């Protein structure tokens, strides 16, 4: 599973599973680029990783802005020479992030737009920009983060559910098809509740608990490794059996 000397670009890298991916890959000898909108947290986390020691760069952008996404891609290539792995972690449910409450039809439509821009377009923008680089290299892996919400829906966070559903099927399949001739794989990891926030502990699963972030990151690292070289265009639910309640 060696990523020694390879370049890993992670969006949403200042916290949660994105940060944990960055820390794990840095410990394996990868050159790590963390992208996040939260500049302060990003700088702190980049310094911590550099102290391992490891090569790490932080790029503070809003992934909803395509020109910034292209600039981030160029900065990483200029600094590290390649992008071998893209992990699209940035995202989250719009009502939680915007701190708005109410029924879907009562909320301003901007809430929906925000959720789509962040969770769907942000990831696809990175796929688009980075696939251009991976095609030149004739190699690469792209990982999407789906969600059990993309499987079961959400009455309030409609954009989040729609975006995660799209990432899990249409986008992952399409990018896998677009990337195949360039030796680029695309896989989506779709977690159930994960303890990146204490609130997730209350969500129901068959296993009676939420996941530790490391359990999800281990699967991401497997799917991105050469051990999973035959895996592309699919999503994997890792949800403690929560989807079984829907049957
Ligand atoms: N935590 C869970 O229970 C869970 C479950 C299923 C799926 N997921 C998905 O996994 C991924 C990671 O989740 P997490 O809980 O580790 O996330 P998190 O909330 O800890 O981190 C998300 C990061 O994305 C960054 N971000 C938000 N908006 C951004 C923007 N516009 N541009 C750049 N960066 C931005 C945030 O600053 C933050 O650092 C997300 O896509 C999430 O939807 C999480």
Image (cartoon, helix red, strand yellow):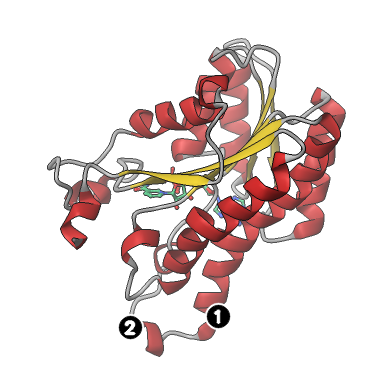
Q: Say left or right for 190 vs 51.
A: left
Q: Within 8 Å: ligand 1 and the Cβ of disc 1?
A: no
Q: For this rendering, which residue is in front, 97 or 230?
A: 230
**Count of marks overlaid on the render:** 2
Q: For this rendering, which residue is in front, 99 or 156?
A: 156
Residue 98 seen anywhere in this rendered image of the structure: no
| Picture residue at 23% right of the left edge, 42% below the top | 240
Which residue, given by chain and number where applicable, does mark 2 sit on? Answer: 103
The image shows residue 86, relative to residue 226, as above or below, that is below
Label located before the other in sequence (1 or 2): 2
Residue 126: assigned label? none
The CA span between labels 1 and 2 is 14 Å
Q: For this rendering, which residue is in front, 36 or 124?
A: 124
| Picture residue at 50% right of the left edge, 76% below the top | 111
Secondary element type, mark 1:
helix
Q: For the residue carrying disc 2, how many other residues have a C-alpha within 10 Å: few (<14), some (14-19), or many (20+)?
A: few
Q: Residue 45's x, y, as percent?
A: 56, 29
Q: Residue 210's x, y, as percent?
A: 23, 42
The answer to the question of whether label 1 and label 2 lie on touching residues, with beta carbons closer than 8 A, is: no
Q: Say left or right for 230 vs 197.
A: right
Secondary element type, mark 2:
loop
Q: Residue 216's x, y, as percent?
A: 38, 34
Which residue, given by chain and number where applicable, does mark 1 sit on? Answer: 110
| Picture residue at 79% right of the left edge, 27% below the top | 82
Q: Quadrant of the C terminus?
A: bottom left
Q: Quadrant of residue 141?
A: top right
Q: Say left or right for 208 vs 160.
A: left
Q: For the residue carrying disc 1, how many other residues have a C-alpha within 10 Å: few (<14), some (14-19), or many (20+)?
A: few
Q: Residue 151's x, y, as percent?
A: 35, 60
Q: Within 8 Å: ligand 1 and the Cβ of disc 2?
A: no
| Picture residue at 58% right of the left edge, 18% below the top | 26
């Amino acid at each position: 599973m060696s990523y020694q000397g390879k370049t890993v670009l992670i969006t949403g890298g200042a916290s949660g599973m994105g940060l944990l991916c960055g820390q794990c890959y840095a410990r394996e000898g990868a050159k790590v680029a963390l992208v996040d909108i939260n500049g302060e947290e990003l700088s702190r986390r980049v310094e911590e990783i550099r102290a391992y020691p490891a090569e790490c760069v932080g790029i503070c952008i809003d992934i909803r802005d395509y020109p910034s996404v292209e600039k981030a891609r160029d900065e990483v290539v200029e600094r590290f020479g390649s992008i071998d792995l893209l992990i699209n972690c940035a995202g989250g449910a719009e009502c939680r992030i915007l701190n708005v409450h109410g029924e879907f039809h009562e909320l301003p439509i901007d809430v929906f737009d925000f959720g789509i821009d962040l969770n769907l377009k942000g990831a696809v923008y990175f796929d688009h920009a980075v696939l251009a680089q991976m095609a030149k290299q004739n190699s690469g892996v792209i990982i999407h983060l789906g969600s059990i919400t993309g499987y079961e829906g959400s009455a309030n966070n409609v954009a989040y559910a729609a975006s995660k559903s799209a990432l899990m099927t249409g986008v992952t399949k399409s990018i896998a098809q677009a990337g195949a001739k360039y030796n680029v794989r695309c896989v989506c990891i779709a977690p159930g509740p994960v303890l990146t926030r204490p609130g997730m502990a209350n969500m129901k699963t068959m296993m009676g608990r939420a996941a530790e972030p490391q359990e999800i990151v281990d699967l991401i690292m497997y799917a991105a490794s050469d051990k999973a070289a035959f895996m592309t265009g699919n999503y994997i639910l890792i949800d403690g059996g929560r989807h079984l309640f829907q049957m």
